[in-house]
Amino acid sequence: MDTMEGRARALILDRDGVVNLDKDYVHKIEDFEFIDGIFDLCRNAAGQGYLILVITNQSGIGRGYYTEDDFHTLNDWMKARFAEEGVTIAQVYFCPYHPVHGIGRYKQDSQDRKPNPGMILRAARDFDLDLPNCILVGDRESDMKAAQTAGIGHKVLYRPEDDSETSTRADYVVSDLGTVLELVAD
């Protein structure tokens, strides 16, 4: 479904904690476990005309835990698994920098590092996104802040376990990825 003025809508996903279980600095295929419901969510969103995008802080690169090549190898495998499930990931944006713990050229503050909105704003330029009609699903408040700053219209905080956090920038808090599109339906 197209938005007004022909601009695109996107389902923008954080990676660790939304696409896959967050096991701290996941960078090997054998450690990557998809979260239940992620493929169905993406297939349904694509069927409704949403582009599928991933934005992810990857300070493990900056900290020297793994390389950009390691990240790209895992990323290519992840995109291929989505393709096997009938889903095209249009783009994956990543930020390897960390302002405190980065090593060498990776020690810097970056507008791409969430909670900054840089990756979302780059995606908006690259795909002519209608941000008020986009959905961002993240598992941390930093994802919600980035989405809010960028002007994302539907901010969804994924929390698989009940957590007593009461204050959030999210529009919705879900424990099941399958409910995301129902919540934002007009």
Image: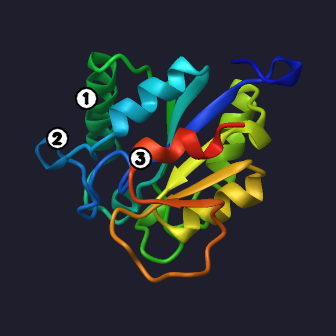
Between discs 2 and 1, the one toward the N terminus: 2
Which residue has dot 2 on it?
29
Farthest-out residue, left: 30
What separation in Å lies between label 3 and label 2 (alpha carbons)? 22 Å
Mark 2 burial class by Cα count in 10 Å: few <14, some 14-19, many 20+: few
Mark sitting earlier along the chain (1/3): 1
Pointers 3 and 2 in contact (CB under 8 A)? no
Q: Percent x, y for residue 177? A: 41, 47
Task: Assess whether mark 3 and mark 1 are in contact (beta carbons under 8 angstroms).
Answer: no
Residue under label 1: 77
Quick check: can you spot residue 28? yes
Choose top left, top right, bottom left or bottom right for residue 99: bottom right
Tell me if I can see residue 110 in this picture.
no
Q: CA separation, marks 2 and 1?
A: 8 Å
In this rendering, the answer to whether 58 lies above or below 34 is below
For the residues labelled 2 and 1, say whether their Cβ atoms are less than 8 Å apart.
yes
Front one among 91 and 181: 181
- Please identify the quarter of the rendering in which residue 164 is found: bottom left
Q: Amino acid at mark 1?
A: Trp
Q: Which amino acid type corresponds to the residue marked 2 in the rendered image?
A: Ile
